[in-house]
Every structure is written in structure tokens, then in C-alpha cells.
Image (tube, rainbow, N blue to C red):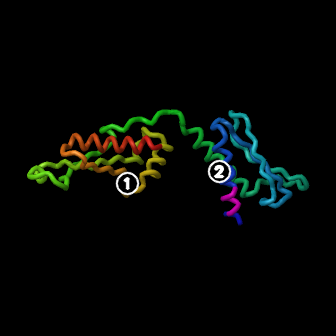
Amino acid sequence: MASTTTRMLKGILLLHLSSTPPSSLLRITRDLSRPFFLSSLQLQRSHPATAIRCASSASDSGNNKVSSRLSQVHELLQEAEHRSLSADYNAPIPKITLDHVTVSFARSGGPGGQNVNKVNTKVDMRFNVGKAHWLSERVREKIMQMEKNRMNKDGELVISSTKTRTQKGNIEDALAKLQVSKSKI
């Protein structure tokens, strides 16, 4: 039952937090005289300069201990507050350039006549998402989530291009693919 309660609380609180501006903080109170699953949690916005506070109230008894589940809710709210305050939702996502990626070349398959066995035109571009600290954590997590099929075990986003018969054209194509995946966020 504890895990069900925790899941329900996470769903309720995350829904509430997603509709609450990041600068607003919450106060939770619960009546300890009733079982936890029957108690009503009261979420109230508090002054933006104050921290999150979890409080419990008992109408019949003098015991004001905060239950362990309420402590878990408090932890969950603190993590959500930290994420919302550290995320800058309005900031533009920086452009990914050749300085941010590793480029390697290989022989490209397909038709090309005698030139195909002489020139390495295939481009493998690797972008280490985990080490891109110039991107916000929210953006990095979103890229890793959306492009999980293109990620290797080292946490690199791997993009290949064989669209043109020149290295320069394939580099530009791979960078364009990388920008498209970033712009989906």
C-alpha cells in the first residue's frame, strides 16, 4: 500500500507542480488523527522567499510527529522545487557547432564508380550529451530520452551521413540532423 500511496501522491503533486509557477512554493498539512490514505493533504502556496515546509496536525492527540510518508512527500517537493528553480524555461538552447562534436570518416557504400574505394566520405558525428555542461540539465535529459536509439553505451549521440559524395556536404548534413534533434525539445 505504501508504494501505491507514493505513486498516487507523486501523480497528484507533479500535476499540481506542473501547473504552479516555479517561483511558488507549497505547504502541506495532514490530519494525523485519521489514517494516511483517508487524510486530506492541503497544498498551499507560501511566500516565494520561504522554503518548503511539511507540517502535520493532530486534532485529538498532542503528537505532532511528521509521518514517514509525509517526509517522503517533503523530499519529493524539495526535489521538484530544486528542478523548477534551476530550469530556465525561456532561455534559448545554444547551437551545437563542430567544436562540440567529434567527427570521423569512413568509406561510404553505394554507387560511385572508381572514386568509392579512394575517398572516405561517410561521416560519423558523435556528440557527448552527458558532458555537454553548457546545455541545461533539462535539455540534456530530454535529448537522451528522445534520441535513446541513437545513443551508444558511452552516452554519445551518434549521427551518420552518406547523403553527398563529399566530406564537407556530409558534415553539414550531420550537423543539420543534430540541430533538428535538438530543436524537437
Would residue 7 be found to the left or right of residue 126 on screen?
right
Q: Amino acid at mark 1?
A: Arg
Q: Residue furthest bottom?
A: 1
The span from disc 1 to disc 2 (Cα, nearest Å) is: 31 Å
Disc 1 vs disc 2: Cβ atoms closer than 8 Å? Answer: no
Which region of the structure is painted magenta?
A: 4-8
Q: Which residue is mark 1?
A: 150
**Element marked by disc 2:** helix
Residue 77, x across and y down, in percent: 66, 47
Q: Which residue is at the far left?
A: 114
The local secondary structure at tag 1 comes to: helix
Label 2 neighbour load within 10 Å: few <14, some 14-19, many 20+: some
Residue at the (25%, 44%) spot, across then down: 170
Left/right of residue 122 with respect to residue 92 in the rendered view: left
The amino acid at mark 2 is Leu
Above or below, 20 against 12 in this view is: above
Give the residue pinned by disc 2. 76
- Residue 140 at x, y percent in the picture: 45, 45
**Does the magenta segment cover residue 18?**
no
First in sequence: mark 1 vs mark 2: 2
Locate the N terminus and report the quarter of the image it occupies.
bottom right
Q: Which mark is residue 52?
A: none
Q: Residue furthest right?
A: 60
**Residue 1 position (above or below residue 62):** below
**Residue at horizontal 65%, vertical 35%?**
23
Whether residue 55 appears in this view of the structure is no
Q: Main secondary structure of the magenta part?
A: helix
Q: Of tags 1 and 2, which is closer to the observer?
A: 1
The x, y position of residue 11, in whole percent, is 66, 54
**Image location of residue 27, percent across then percent down:** 74, 43
**Left/right of residue 58 with respect to residue 131 in the rendered view:** right
| Residue drawn where x is 71% and y is 42% of the image | 26
